[in-house]
Amino acid sequence: MNSTHITVAIIDDHDMFRAGVRASLESFVHVIAEAADVDSAVETLHAQPPQVVLLDVHMPGGSGGGGAEVLRRCASLTSTTKFLALSVSDAAEDVVSVIRAGARGYVTKNISGPELSDAIRRVNSGDAVFSPRLAGFVLDAFGTQSADVAAEDDELDRLSAREQEVMRLIARGYTYREVASELFISVKTVETHVSAVLRKLQLSSRHELTRWAAARRLL
């Protein structure tokens, strides 16, 4: 195990799924703990906090709150431990509940091993990560300004049309490679546009960009 690998805990009530995730991630991260229900998850995470927790939304135990309950009972850890929801569910209520409780992202279980590894790395570095179609649920729940106001926003006017396209996709959780494919440009060009967007908006990370876009209902 590489000493620079991110430490991870897998919280899911299906033994075979945990084994599969561990096997698919073993070259990328260091899995230090597992748990199969709410109570054991809370105990395990407090005993040995990892850098990132892969957290299922629905699981037995506790008072029936599932992943959101784990987050609430581990609130004291969130300054150093990042939580990434990993679930078969793509229901809006599930996405919103765990994000409200403190998760930094939400991806579905059809994600590949390398994609999940990238999501873990991004969440650990402070970004918000969502499977693309799920970002809209968060925007609907947390957005506060109208689209009309957003269209007139002076900050948005600083961005070129192409930069606005890139900004929206990045804020929705697309990877650089996915943005490049969607817009028929190179990954290098995407990186250049993202750097320009962050500089013009005076933001420091993709997580801040997602929050900025969500507040303006730009997605």
Image (tube, rainbow, N blue to C red):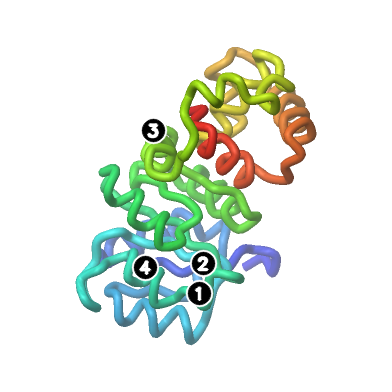
**Could you tell which of marks 3 and 4 lies nearer the N-terminus?**
4
Say what amino acid the circle numbered 4 marks.
Answer: Ile
The image shows residue 114, relative to residue 100, as above or below, that is above
Residue occupied by mark 3: 133
Disc 2 residue crowd, few under 14, some 14–19, many 20+, Cα 10 Å? many
- The residue identified by callout 1 is 32
Q: 75 left or right of 187? A: left
- Does label 1 or label 4 sit earlier along the sequence? 4
The residue at 43%/38% (across/down) is 139
> Residues at badges 4 and 2 in contact (C-beta under 8 Å)?
no
Query: Is 198 above or below relative to 65?
Result: above
Give the camera-side residue of 87 and 151. 151
Q: Give percent across and percent down for residue 195.
A: 76, 32
Q: CA distance from mark 3 to mark 2?
A: 25 Å
Q: Which residue is mark 4?
A: 11
Select label 3 or label 4 by which is in front. 3
- How busy is the neighbourhood of tag 1: few (under 14 within 10 Å), some, or many (20 plus)? some
Residue under pointer 2: 8
Q: Are dots 3 and 2 in contact, CB under 8 Å? A: no
Q: Nearer the viewer, mark 3 or mark 1?
A: 3
Q: Horizontal and vertical percent for residue 138?
A: 41, 43
Q: Return the x and y of residue 91 as percentages of the image width and height.
A: 26, 44
Q: CA distance from mark 4 to mark 2?
A: 10 Å
